[in-house]
Image: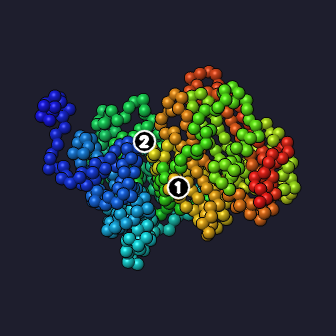
Amino acid sequence: MRRLAGKVPPNELDHLTLADIPTSSAAALARFLFVLLSDCDVRIRWRAAHAVRRLARFGETEPLRALLDLYDRTVDATFRAPNAPFYFLTARLWLLFAVDRIAAEAPSALRGYGARLFDIATDEALPHVLIRAFAKDAASKLTDEGTLKLTPRQRAVLKRSNMTELPPKRVSDRYEQGLEPTRPEADRKRRFHFNSIDTLPYWYEPAARLFWGVRVDEFTDLAERWIVDTWKADPSTWMWKNESRQKRFPERSWGLWSNDHGSMPTIERYSTYLEWHAMCCTIGELMRSRPTLKTKRDDLDRLSDWLDGYRLTCPPHWLADLRAPKPLRARFWSAPSTALEAWLQQAGDEDFLREIEIGGSRSGMLVADCWYETRSSAFSSEVRVSSALVEPSTAAALVRALQTVQEPSNYAIPSEGSDHEIDHPPYRLVGWLGRAGADSRIDGKDPFRNRVSGGRSRPSASERKRLKQVLAADGTTMWVDRNGTTSYIFEEWSDEKDEERPSYGVIQSGGQRLWVSIESLQRLLLRARLELLVRVALTKRKGSSEYRRHSQEEAPWLRYEKILLLRRDGTIEAAQGRLGTWFSSS
């Protein structure tokens, strides 16, 4: 070691203090994971969070407890670059983010730690709204499960924590605050330089408008106090020359470390880290003294809505939990078996029926809603399936009319409650499936989700009340009845990573499908006295727009569409006539 160390230039040599290195492997692993949870790259934080979650799943309580005991740590000169700022608030947030998930799936691993979570959730010294939110959620889960015992008074305190107790101020418009005009923020001399292009207008202004009578400059004053007075940050840290980890922020990847228009960066500069956590603490501070705004149009608490925007997309699960295996069908794994020119021109009835999977991989079920894409550098194929309930007496006429529409965007197959529903008997086209689409949130940066989005089709509201929702071990979501019989299955898969382009010749697929049991669909159609109209759209492309983005020629493509009608008697009809059956009378 002395010989090797002698070859390292003195300015590149790291000197470690042996007394700072833990003597147990559990403590060393905890320190290692804690600094990874603080990394400036969100993708590394995610990998560390998954590792923390696995510790609990595998019953490794010793390193997990050693990690939990590091919550108050604000420095670490051994397991990370000693000359770079330590994002200790990020480490705390992501630790509690992982702990909240552990509380739902392995609460016994947190036995004895519930009281600490209660203290963090009710902490007024650090009123970080997201840290307290995840601590509160975790403590509540442990309380409901019985791992954490709280007195009635403590339960009441926990319920009120991270919430404003002041009644909201009702106004006609969210911009109406009765504020005196103030000079522009750019004219003010500040102790810390805030990003006036992205942070102030897209983070701080919306956050200040959550409260009555709070100007942006007052909000920024409070944030500045946290940064300069509480955390003792260097006011010149925003300057590029003072960025201690410049190699972590490559110039060509500016989009990864920019908070452009209020987006959350994938790689976070120190100044951005300070601005964002100061915003979270300032909101927590204002919750104690200022009422929130509520307009006539606000159906929900706007402060809670703001908080939800930085939490999980599909709570309590992470998006990676919802990533199911890619279906075992050749069209998702391999190129077309025929020549691409011939494949481009082919779209027979069997191709459309194949997409609703009657008699397919899931016995006794069919696909009621779907979107997926399979592509490589040589071809791409996109499939969409949508369905709605239709009046039997006018169904055949509607099928023929829709089949003649040249532009598919000129009409819509409605979902439940959609504005596109038609309900004027005998002309009826009504939705029977719900939509749960949402923009990805904190788990949108998880590298293990690939491109799973959480935008989901699901059973109707009445069906969800009747059925129990279960997440299977393979990531599929099932809705089962009281007898344990599966009525619906939702699967979403993706083998394409968000920030990686596929290698030449590699075939990748991603999409989602909602299955319904034939028996459940039969009962629904008989009860409603309606039929099921199904639209199947196929788009085929020779070549890929991804690989031809520098070419002036558009890759040749063709779109095919088929309108199917699933009758209550089991027959399948199209505009040209009968195509087959979707169930047998036996």
Location of mark 2 (residue)? 266
Label whose residue precedes the other's in the sequence (2 or 1): 2
The extreme top residue here reads 552
Gap in angstroms between the C-alphas marked 2 and 1: 20 Å
- Residue at 34%, 35% (x, y): give it: 248
Question: What scheme was used to colour the molecule?
Answer: rainbow
Is residue 373 in view?
A: no
Inspect the image, locate mark 1, and give the three-letter code of the amino acid beneath it: Cys
Q: Using the rendered view, name the quadrant where residue 266 is placed.
A: top left
Q: Residues within 10 Å of mark 1 (few under 14, many from 20)?
A: many
Location of residue 514 with respect to 123 vertically, above or below:
above
Q: Residue at x 61, y 32 (%)?
A: 335
Name the residue nearer the viewer: 518 or 76: 518
- What amino acid does circle 2 point to? Thr
Q: Is residue 248 above or below residue 397?
A: above
Considering the image in quadrants, where does the N terminus appear? top left
Residue beneath disc 1:
314
Closer to the camera in the image, 291 or 103: 103
Name the secondary structure under disc 1: loop
Residue 31 makes an appearance in the image: yes
* Residue at 60% across, 66% down: 484
Instruction: Say which quadrant the C terminus sits in.
Output: bottom right
393 with respect to 92 (left or right): right
